[in-house]
Image (cartoon, coloured by chain):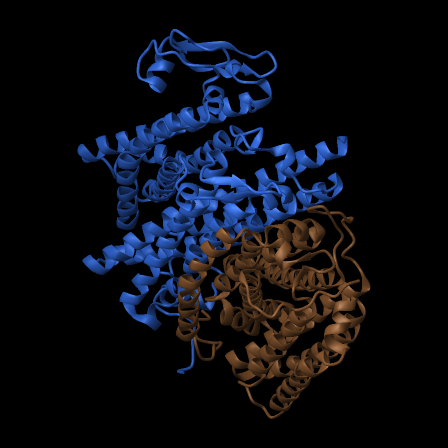
Chain colours: A blue, B brown
Amino acid sequence: MLDGADALLLARLQFAFTVSFHIILPAFTIGLASYLAVLEGLWLYTKRQVYLDLFKFWVKIFAVSFAMGVVSGLTMAYQFGTNWSVFSDKAGPVIGPLMAYEVLSAFFLEAGFLGVMLFGMNRVGKGLHFAATLAVAFGTALSAFWILSVNSWMQTPSGHGVNEVGQFVPLDWLAVIFNPSFPYRLVHMLLAAYITTALVVGAVGAWHLLRDRMNQHARTMFAMAMGMVAVVAPLQLVAGHEHGINTLQHQPVKVYAMEGHFEPSPNGAPLILFGMPSREAAETKHAIAIPGLGSLVLAGSTDAPLQGLKSFPREDWPPVAIVFWAFRIMVGLGLLMIALGAVAVLAWATGRLFESRPLHRFALAMGPAGFVAVLAGWTVTEVGRQPYTIYGLLRTVDSASPLSAPAVGASLMAFVVVYFIVFGAGFLYLLRLMRRTPGAPPAETPEPMEGPIRTAAGGLGSPIAVQGA
Amino acid sequence: MPVTPVPISYDLATLWAAIIAIAIFAYVVLDGFDLGLGILFPALSNEEERGVAMNTVAPVWDGNETWLILGGGGLFAAFPLAYSVLMPALYPLVIAMLLGLVFRGVAFEFRWRAGRLETRHRWDLAFFGGSLVAALAQGMMLGAILQGVKVEGRAYAGGWWDWLTPFSILTGLALVAGYALLGAAWLLMKTDGAVNAHARRLARPALLATVAAIGAVSLWTPFLKEQYFDRWLNWPNILWVAPVPVLLVAAAWQAWRKLNAGDDHWPFPMALAIFFLSFSGLGISIYPQIVPGALTIYEAATVPKSQVFMLIGVALLLPVILGYTAWTYWVFRGKVRAGQGYH
């Protein structure tokens, strides 16, 4: 039985590892696809060269990120069956069709039009090319719709029944798809994707401004990114809060783990800023707390009663410390993002948006913050769902494949080695692409070994050399 | 062992089996030619030939790979029990395939991003190795499924090396040969000059190897299970299935003739025909089993409500997908030339 426990732990590690690598790529490409669509639209509307140059600059970065997203996503499509076959058998009738819809409506759209978006400008004309870019952007967002519906159903299952062989079966598709936590999660994740991309674009703009504050292309991307951060980061705070209230209704245990509340608080709960939660000791040690604020945030008044982890059986508690700390990392970074937006607006209002070096350094430092916050947020919601895969219905321990520990361990090792090589190189190439001076003629920033497709006249304008049909 | 009769009336499970079969076939031929290019990559003479070969598939490979997600995702959605039995049964093969596809997928992008020639060669090696491993793993999965999988209750009950047999090694090599043929025929169609001539030289042995491998698999398969034997060699079934091998030989002969006649366009559709006929042969062997020896499509199928819900999506979206996929190929039609763009 020790072997079974080991295999389970390894399978969980494998899923956490592969999904963590994967999630940051769509989080980036969802936002970047929309940004590219905006850039191309602005170019078509204003005819200003700077937008086309920025499109060309970012579309290469998109291509590399997208390729990594496709191959890491392919792994996910099979991971359910390889390591979680009991879960797949039981949940297949409900979540399988949603994933099929994701492939049919979103993946094909993205991948199908990507070729035209990357290489097709001269072949299809501006209008159709723009349509292809829009299709890619729409496809990326639509894939988020379906996969978040699946995830949300696993968090807050509804619209289902159980058949005679123990499978969950759909009774009402609308109730399955639009399950209680889905709208909140969808908004929260899409906003996260847009902020993540804005922070990357802003950091790249800031880096180029730090080198040359007169670079018009860097100015344009920096201004666009900071505007996006200033608007969306505060919205995300609101969306995140609403999501939290929704979670309190449906998964209170998760919220009490996030808050570090073990004891019920009949007379109002404090807000624990920091502390050392211990699942074993069932208390949060060394807590620094603001009295009443916890109830105010979650229930609307300082003396509103709240439950605590101890109101629920201990075997239903998630790993409290992980959830507690991941939540603080996410919120802390979110507050920094709001601060960045505010500082940028202030600099803009005083005419120093392109002059303020501290602002540019701040924006540069915040470049990876979106990715970290996304991973932390997913840790909160996924670890917070434990010990269940389907919340309240199917325990993680009852979900895994009948595999031996060596099989899962060996494949985990293989994934770790391959992912570090492949995605390590990929992120290096992405940084290299971001380092190019935006808007500079190709000769000034030589790209050694550039392939034929991507180079000629800046890639977009001249696709593969092809004989007339 | 009782032989399952072929039901005459069509039904949702059969319809879904057909849809999954179409998705897998689309994947096999679409990704087949770009995996084939990867397998042939080291045989291409120089930087220029490799660059051209890569560019013939660069605009379409993401879409090609998506069919594999539909194959896996569709199997999960339509036959969750088969998915949850087969994935653990084929575990090392699936992992090897995925890792192979990771390497070759990123190589498309990374080889142009590499700063030094050495690094580029390393990604070219990854493209070759990844393609070869993925092709071999897919072929071996096919063999492993054909020879049967041990099931108890609703779960896989075998060991994690059960798939490894002489038969599965043969099917693995057969698919590698077949993909190499598709890749060479594709290159023939999409290029001219030196690359084209080279592709022709590579296509001939690939065709011979493919035909030999199909022959070996075909002779071996009927003796794996009673049902296969019955389908292929018992009267009157033999009458119904005889056209498959006959047409296959005809397609191979036509491909061979056109290859030697200097034709660029016939070998690819003929290679597709060879794949289609082989694929039909598989269907004839295993239908209505989905995990031969253990599960039929009826036992593995999801509930009707899920089948119908997805059917709506397929009916609405699959024609659209086929439409814009065809459009993409149309946009990038014609031959890809070296020279222009190499600066």
Q: Position of residue B208 (x, y in %)?
A: 71, 81
Evaluate whether residue A358 shows in this view.
no
A207 is higher (above) or lower (below) than B82: above
Quadrant in the rendering for residue A347: top left
Count numbered badges in the picture: 0
Q: Position of residue A244 (x, y in %)?
A: 39, 27
In the image shown, does A376 or A161 lie closer to the viewer? A161
In the image shown, does B300 or A197 lie closer to the viewer? B300
A359 is higher (above) or lower (below) than A316: below
Q: Position of residue A235 (x, y in %)?
A: 29, 33
Q: Position of residue A381 (x, y in %)?
A: 48, 31
Q: Residue at x 33, y 53 (%)?
A: A36
A182 is higher (above) or lower (below) than B128: above
Q: Residue at x 43, y 63 (%)?
A: B315
Left or right placement of residue B36 versus residue A25 in this view: right
Residue found farthest to the top: A267
In the image shown, does B318 or B164 lie closer to the viewer? B318
Q: Residue at x 60, y 90 (%)?
A: B258
Evaluate whether residue B82 shows in this view.
yes
Quadrant in the rendering for residue B3: bottom right
Image quarter in which the N terminus of chain B is found: bottom right
Image quarter in which the C terminus of chain B is found: bottom left
